[in-house]
Image (cartoon, grey):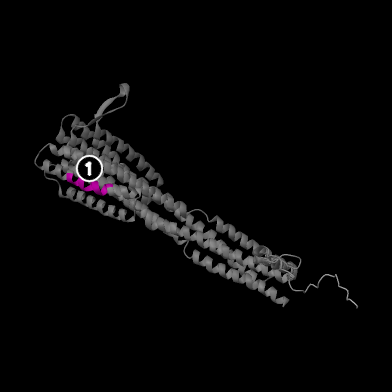
Amino acid sequence: MTYQQQSTAAPPQGRAGASPAVPPQAPPPGPQGRPQGPDAGPPRRTAWAEGVDRLRAGATTEPGRLRIIGAVLAVLVVTFGAVTAWEMTERSAAADDVLHSSQPLSADAADIYRSLADANTAASSGFLAGGQEPAKTRQRYEDDISLAADKLVTAAANSEPGSTSAKTITDLNKMLPEYKGLVERARANNRQGYPLGGAYLRYANAKMQIMLDDAERLYTVENQRLRSDYDDATPYPWIAIGAGVVAIGGLVWAQRRNYRRTNRVLNHGLVAATAATTVVLLWLVVGHTVARAGLNDSYDHGVRSMNTLNDARLASLKARSNENLTLVSRGAETKDVGTGADKQTVDTFDYDFEQQMKALTTKLAAAEDLADDSAGVKPVEAATGNMKVWKERHAEARTQDTLGNYQGALDKVIGSKADKPTGECFDSVETNLKAAITHERAEFEQAAGDGRGAMNGLVVGAAVLAVLAAAGAVLGIGRRLSEYR
């Protein structure tokens, strides 16, 4: 009996119960989802890197270089036009503010100051006239108070809420009716012959001095605002000028390069672009130089003269008020001046009168130096002459008052024309200073208007010519590119 031999070899892999084979897995993804491993493709590049490579590759060929040059020239010219429009828009706006905003507001502040001081002078003059106050003096006082109130309304409308000027205007609006009430009480008592009227008038004058300090502060702030607008309007636009020089330099370089490579003298597009850019640059430099000269002239021969004349007018008004109050108080208010052995007691109002007359003398001399034509010099000279006569008559009035002749002193101050009163000299000083201010204001408006006019059209003209220049540069380069097609 034959037996079959048993095999001891391992069973085949496909037998049941064996583990199935695991298929090959792809490698894990790398950063940004890119596959890794030896079979992975090149990493994806950014758009910026691809753009740089294309630009670099294009720059190796003449057409590519021409495209780059054309783009750079267009950017330079457009940038020049944009910067010119930007800088000249700012300077034009500042010049407009000088002509139509800050200077008129400064003049309004001066009018507030002057009308308040003149109202105080008229009130004291009317008081000295006694119970029968002249209708002319009364009307002058009412006109001054009305003008001050109107100017305060205008100043309030043009001031920034919460600013120092707005607070000052509010304070003045509160104190004005209080001052008027004190003056009316002084008049009522004066008409009845009560000495209390003088006390009320001195109290009203003390209130007015506070108001004048506030008005002077407002005047100073508005003058600073005017000076700031001048500082914004007059500086040369150096950024725009520099951009223009760079743009013209780039256009000249491109034409020179074109000539060296093609032996052609002119490229019409580039020549037109250079001409337009040069026109804008010359217009910018010449126009702003003329505007700057006009604005500087309006300040030197207009604003400075008006400020000096306004100061002189205020000194005159204060002097006249103190002269009147010297007689109203009759020595009731005194002050000590000097020190040591030189210390002496003087009448407060007469001492202030002397100080204001010194200021008036100084300001009139300065105004005469600033006047640049005969029309401006003549009224200042006339005011100076009247001031000298005023001093002489005042000395005579003080002599009469010192001798105890109160009526004689009163006649020398507010008397009739036959008495040769100081009031006649004061009125002449006022009239001449007003004429001088009117003349200087006309000069300011003429010079500032001419300066502002020199900027007309520059913003729009610069923008239009810059666009045309950029188009010319692109067309000029495009003409060269067409030769490679």
**Dot 1: few (<14), some (14–19), or many (≥20) neighbours within 10 Å?**
many
Residue 75 position, x and y percent, is 60, 65
Above or below residue 376? Residue 483 is below
**Residue carrying label 1:** 423
- Which one is nearer the viewer's eye here, 172 or 315? 172
Quadrant including the N terminus: bottom right
Using residue 19 as the reference point, say whether residue 459 is left or right of it. left
Magenta stretch mostly in which secondary structure?
helix
Would residue 173 be counted in the magenta stretch? yes
| Residue at the extreme left of the image, as rendered | 192
Would residue 417 be counted in the magenta stretch? no
In the figure, residue 71 lies in which quadrant?
Answer: bottom right
Residue 477 position, x and y percent, is 66, 71
- Which one is nearer the viewer's eye here, 66 or 443? 66
Quadrant including the C terminus: bottom right
Q: Which residues are magenta?
A: 171-181
**Kind of residue at disc 1:** Gly
In the figure, residue 78 lies in which quadrant?
Answer: bottom right
Residue 10 position, x and y percent, is 83, 70
Q: Is residue 416 visible?
A: no
Residue 258 position, x and y percent, is 71, 68
- Which one is nearer the viewer's eye here, 35 or 325? 35
